[in-house]
Image (cartoon, grey):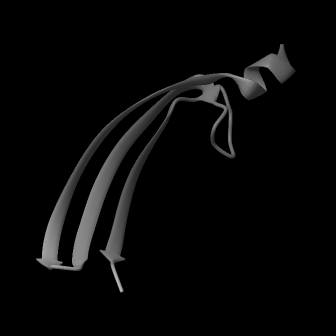
Amino acid sequence: AGAFNFTRIDQHSFSAGVRWDVGPQTALKLQLDDIHTAPYGGGLWAFNTNDAHHALVLSAGVDFIF
């Protein structure tokens, strides 16, 4: 059962993002992800315990064309 619980994936996430075209060849992007895992549901993460977990992930990116 321990090996099975270690690989179990049970998570829900909500994401929101914005993009701003700074110029004709440059764009800035921000994204916020709100992630919730169930007990023994963190198989995609480095931890997988009998506790539920929560993570907020903020990412930023710059896209440009030469």
Q: Residue 64: which quarter of the image? A: bottom left
* 35 relative position to 29: left or right: right
Q: Which residue is outermost to the bottom?
A: 66
* Quarter containing the N terminus: top right
Percent of width and height locating residue 59: 37, 63
Q: Residue 39: which quarter of the image? A: top right
Compare residues 39 and 4 and report the one nearer the observer: 4
Percent of width and height locating residue 62: 33, 75
Percent of width and height locating residue 20: 14, 68
Q: Which residue is outermost to the front?
A: 66
* 64 relative position to 50: left or right: left
Q: Residue 14: which quarter of the image? A: top left
> Could you tell me how many numbered marks the image carries?
0
Q: Which residue is outermost to the top?
A: 1
Q: Is residue 61 above or below residue 36?
A: below
* Quarter containing the C terminus: bottom left
Q: Residue at x 68, y 31 (%)?
A: 49
Q: Residue at x 61, y 25 (%)?
A: 9
Q: Residue at x 29, y 56 (%)?
A: 31
* 16 relative position to 13: left or right: left
Q: Is residue 47 above or below residue 7?
A: below
